[in-house]
Image (cartoon, rainbow, N blue to C red):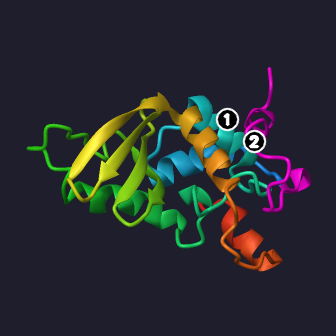
Amino acid sequence: MLSLVDELLQYREPDCPLPFDRGQIQGYSEAELLEISQRCNLSIHGDFRRLLLEMGRCSGGLLWGSYFSIYDQRYTPESFKDMQGIWDEGEPFNPQSTDYRDPVKHQMLVLSAVYENYNYILFTDDNSVWLCDDNELSLRRMPGLFMQHLIYCVEEQNKPWRGVPICDRLVRSQTYGRLL
């Protein structure tokens, strides 16, 4: 069976301008996964578990914070749990909404923001991925599961880089895990 890293590398273009260093990839330990689960109110199983065990602490440049929140420098360990309560207060996380899913009960993790008004969300209790549309105040289940979202993130990063100079500080701020 391929490692998660090897599976995702199949979707990375060989001439991708973003740095990738397999030697930098680090995962969390089993004890750290337990701490993350309790601290952030997240179920950790399936491909989400594989991700955290293999490259949760550092993606080595395979996944970047601009597409995947656990590597985004704007987040802290506390913010991941706090998000569940904040999102629970507003639409579409309103019990009267037809698409309602309780973000605390279903252990929500915001995966990534797309533009200003769209967020991909992982409900870790069943590893389902949802799209939250702030314009329409809706929550819609995406056809794939977590692995398809990871593939999407790797493929999206292969698009031309926006001219931002790539330095060690940028790499550290966008590829190191924020769950602990």
* Prevalent SS, magenta region: loop
**Can you give x and y, in whole percent of width and height, for residue 59 in the image?**
74, 53
Disc assigned to residue 31: none
Residue 30 can be seen in this image: no
Vertical comparison of 117 with 31: above or below? below
Q: Are marks 1 and 2 in contact (CB under 8 Å)?
A: yes
Dot 1: few (<14), some (14–19), or many (≥20) neighbours within 10 Å? some
Name which residue lies at 81% across and 35% down.
Answer: 6
Element at label 2: helix
**Can you give x and y, in whole percent of width and height, for residue 118 in the image?**
37, 56
**Can you give x and y, in whole percent of width and height, for residue 43 in the image?**
48, 38
Would residue 19 be counted in the magenta stretch?
A: yes
Q: Quadrant of residue 147?
A: top right
Element at label 1: helix
Furthest residue in direction left, as rendered: 96
Q: Which residue in the structure is indicated by mark 2?
A: 54
Looking at the image, residue 162 sits to the left or right of residue 123; the answer is right
Disc assigned to residue 50: 1
Name which residue lies at 75% across and 70% down.
Answer: 172
Quarter of the C terminus within the rendering: bottom right
**Can you give x and y, in whole percent of width and height, for residue 69 in the image?**
54, 59
* Type of amino acid under label 1: Arg
Would residue 16 be counted in the magenta stretch?
A: yes
Which of the two residues, 38 or 119, is positioned nearer the viewer here? 119
Q: What span is colored magenta in the figure?
A: 1-24
Q: Quadrant of residue 47?
A: top right
The Cα–Cα distance between marks 1 and 2, rounded to whole angstroms, is 6 Å
Which of the two residues, 24 or 106, is positioned nearer the viewer here? 24
Which of the two residues, 156 or 93, is positioned nearer the viewer here? 156
